[in-house]
Structure formats: structure tokens, C-alpha cells
Image (spheres, helix red, strand yellow):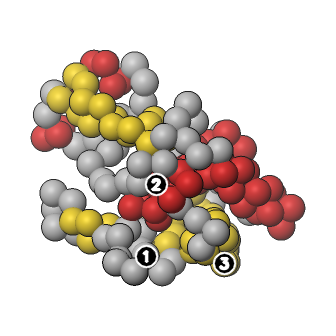
Amino acid sequence: MEENIQLNEHNKQEYPPMHTCEHILNQTMVRMFGCGRSRNAHIERKKSKCDYHLPQCPTDEQVAELQRRVNEVIARNLPVTAELMTRAEAQALVDLSRLPDEAGDTLRVVRVGDYDACACIGSHVENTSEIGEFRVISHDYRDGCWRVRFKLLPR
């Protein structure tokens, strides 16, 4: 089976299923905990991690619910699309606070069905059915930062 790895504009290897899953995880965290999207992420093929600013560590029940919700979105077989738009158009849809000033006036907004929209230059799957099963493998909490480590299992 051929590896599904692509290079983005910065010559960084990306694994589209994991990167798309990060979008779903971010939106699920926003919806469940009212926090912002991950401020620090390390996305790799075998395992990945994201950091979220939270007032307290999620309970084991909340972590299990997070995993369930992410997998529920993946199972919806949502289309993943990208659209170029002006910065002003994008600002009406997504948070641009982390966008560098040199990004220009035309931005690429990636949508995961009706679930998430995010300005992004990365590589993604065409449909969430290509992601696999999301699994939290560990997590810890320190100084207001919750770090979650996860992997994807084949469906």
C-alpha cells in the first residue's frame, strides 16, 4: 500500500488523515470546553499531540466523550474542501488571530463538511471516511495547559 504523505509549501511532510483529524479535534475541543484551537501542535503519521489552555484537567469521562465525539464526526463521511477567499471574507468565518501578517490578502479556508472551517495551507483528505479511528493514547495537565496525545487506527 502506498504511503499517503504529501509535502506542503514549506517542504514539511504531512499525513493528510492526521492533519484533517486535527481540525476535527480542534473544533470538538472548542465545542466541548469553550477553549481556543490548539496553540501548539505536533502532527505526525504515527502519533500526534495538541496543547489546549484549560482551567482544569478534563476528567476521564470527558476524555472518553471527546474521543467518542471526534469519531462520530469522522464517521459522518463529511467532504473536506478548500476555498480561496479574501482576508475580509475569511475573517467573517474563522479566527485569524494566529495568521501571520505576511499571509497576504487571499487565504485558503479548509472546511470539514458543516463541522469546521479553518484557514490552513496543509494537506487534507477528501472525505472524513479516509481518516480512520481517533484514539487518545495519553494526556497530562500542567500550568493551565492540557496536552493530549493521539493516534489513528485503521477502520
Residue hosting label 2: 20
Residue shown at the point (53%, 51%) measured from the top left? 128
* Alpha carbon separation for disc pair 1 and 2: 12 Å
Q: Which amino acid does label 2 sit on?
A: Thr
The kind of secondary structure element at disc 1 is loop
Q: Which is more N-terminal, label 3 or label 2?
A: 2
Q: What residue type is labelled 1?
A: Arg
Q: Which amino acid does label 3 sit on?
A: Ile
Q: How crowded is mark 3: few (under 14 residues within 10 Å), some or many (20 or more)?
A: few
Tell me the mark number nearer the camera, choosing from 2 and 3: 2
Residue 81, compared with residue 9, is above or below; it is above
Pick the residue in front: 60 or 134.
134
Q: How crowded is mark 1: few (under 14 residues within 10 Å), some or many (20 or more)?
A: some
Q: At which x and y percent is residue 1?
A: 40, 80
Q: Which is more N-terminal, label 2 or label 1?
A: 2
Residue hosting label 1: 45
